[in-house]
Image (tube, helix red, strand yellow):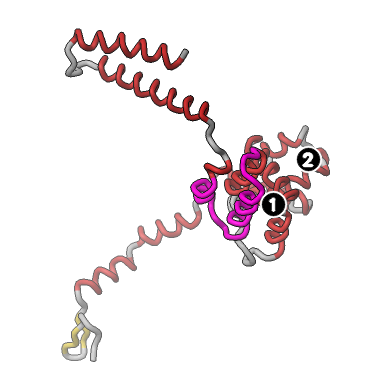
Amino acid sequence: MGRTGRHKSGGAQTLTHEDLARRRRRSDPSRRLRSSMGAKIITKTDRQMEDRLHAVASDPERADTLQKARAFKRTWIELAEALSRVHDKQLWDRWGFSDFDAYCRKELHLRSSTVAKLLGSYRFLETTAPRVIERARTDRHEAPIPSLPVVEFVQRATETGAADAETLRSIHRVAFEEGADAPVLNRQFGKLAFPQTDRDRREKLRAQIAQAARRLSSLIAEDGAPVPRQLAIRLEETIGELLEAVEN
């Protein structure tokens, strides 16, 4: 029997509308062009880094660090480890850069703030959770590799000192062994790790009141606002008094 939707008549096969549409899509040259273009699109920065990678291929440490910089969204621990090595050995000087920051900026296309986060988080893992680094080196499937925001959360919770030892152990377990992401950590441990004081709550409320008051003042002042003029004047005076009270 023939396939559903196709009919034979005198040995010839009759195609359905769906068959014809499928053939047109397969033969569409613009579709093939779009597909091939999409596979080859790379950014200007990536192209520059690829060219540089070929240029420094004779220096294994330099090429290795540059390669990890290209892929650091997936392998941030590997990049941080390489950066730590470059920094500690001052390899950037041998490679002709004036300082470590210039090397990171010009060759790796990394901002100083990004490098500081990478090195800070890596060194935190070195001292508090070296098993995570070892896992990244040897067996990525043993347990999940934490993202940079996850490590930053754990580091901040540790340095703040508000959480007790048991809570910190739980944070480490959930972050580094169970693979929770940063929003989950914040929901589960945020209030324990970063408790708000009464002063913090008052300051937050003060800012919210001031923001709402300014928004109301802006709406009243708009052309066509459906507020009687005398009432608008009184409201503006009251809003001014309110802002003076909450901001001073």
Mark 1 element type: helix
Query: What is the three-letter code of the residue carrying label 2?
Result: Trp
The vertical placement of 85 against 27, above or below, is above
Report which residue position mark 1 lands on.
54
**In the rendered structure, which disc, 2 or 1, sits on the residue that comes first in sequence?**
1
Magenta span includes 168: yes
Question: Between tags 2 and 1, which lies in front?
Answer: 2
Instruction: Tell whether label 1 touches label 2 (CB within 8 Å).
Output: no
**Nearer to me, 219 or 198:** 198
Question: In this rendering, does residue 42 appear at all?
Answer: no
Magenta span includes 94: no
Q: In the image, what residue occupies the spot 69% across and 53% down?
A: 78
**Nearer to me, 150 or 194:** 194
The span picked out in magenta is: 160-189
Report which residue position mark 2 lands on.
92
Q: How busy is the neighbourhood of tag 2: few (under 14 within 10 Å), some, or many (20 plus)?
A: some
Q: In the image, what residue occupies the spot 77% across and 44% down?
A: 86
Q: Is residue 88 left or right of residue 66?
A: right
Please state the horizontal and vertical placement of residue 1, each as a whole percent of the image.
23, 91
Please state the horizontal and vertical placement of residue 54, each as a whole percent of the image.
69, 51
The vertical placement of 112 against 136, above or below, is above
